[in-house]
Image: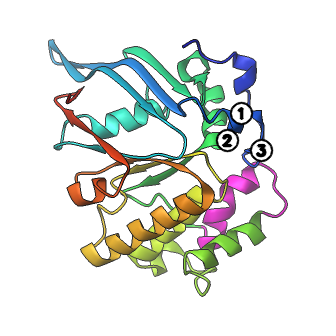
Amino acid sequence: MTGAPVADCEPTSPKAINSAFRMKTNLPIVRATGLSKIVANGDAALAILQEIDLEVMPGEAVAVVGASGSGKSTLLGLLAGLDEPTSGRVELDGCDLFGLDEDGRAALRARLVGFVFQSFHLLPALDATENVMLPLELAGDLKAQAEAAAILRRVGLGERLRHYPRTLSGGEQQRVALARAFITRPKLLLADEPTGNLDAATGAAIIDLMFELNAEHGTTLLLVTHDEMLARRCSRFIRLAAGRIEK
């Protein structure tokens, strides 16, 4: 499939999700074709990913599983345009990701993609509300503070609106990160080991919340995990081994 014209991929507000772009529900929201990543390793070349082909349809919850070093996080970074492939193509909602320059990729991510990581990536100088409202504030949304407070209440942090990350537990920090990821109502949520820094009980609660928010917002989920039980909660899973998808 040929990617959408670049004009279709130009930035708009992260809130402009209900455009014609969102109506392409019969097309994959993520498509990778021949995706490879090779890096120098001394005098040799190390193939981290080799000829990856995959599609994720709107509304799916897909897990990427595999042993440490199998290329899971590298794949997620390439699909988000945070890293560039050695070869191959990625389309996000029909848009050729690497047909855009770096600013164009960033604008596309801001409109379509939310992120949740193992490390919470909260800004320590900002309180919970300020961390969550940041994506909307950068886009000039005048209701950013009210919307941030509302989604923080939704994730159970109504009493922590003005708390700084250092005063929050790990589970609370990840709830803030989830609220920040969902505040733009992304079409696609990319999660990289989102419970890796949490104890089992807290991690289970965070995963329950993530699936609830996904269902409420109709978001597509692409989840990297080593947890087979978590993977089985998704509609399907893809297994990576030595940089390739196992058939």
Vertical arrangement, residue 3 with respect to residue 234, above or below: above
Residue 72 percent coordinates (x, y): 29, 39
Residue 234 percent coordinates (x, y): 36, 53
The magenta span reads: 126-143
Task: Classify residue 64 by image quadrant.
Answer: top left
Quadrant into which the C terminus falls: top left
For the residue pair 223 and 27, the one nearer the viewer reads as 27
For the residue pair 162 and 67, the one nearer the viewer reads as 67
Asked whether 95 falls inside the magenta stretch, the response is: no
Task: Classify residue 94 by image quadrant.
Answer: top right
Residue 92 falls left or right of residue 139: left
- Residue at which label 2 appears: 111
The label on residue 16 is 3
Q: Residues within 10 Å of mark 1 (few under 14, many from 20)?
A: some
Q: Give the amino acid type for the residue marked by disc 2 in the picture.
A: Arg
For the residue pair 166 and 188, the one nearer the viewer reads as 188
Tell me the residue at 45%/67% (across/down): 174
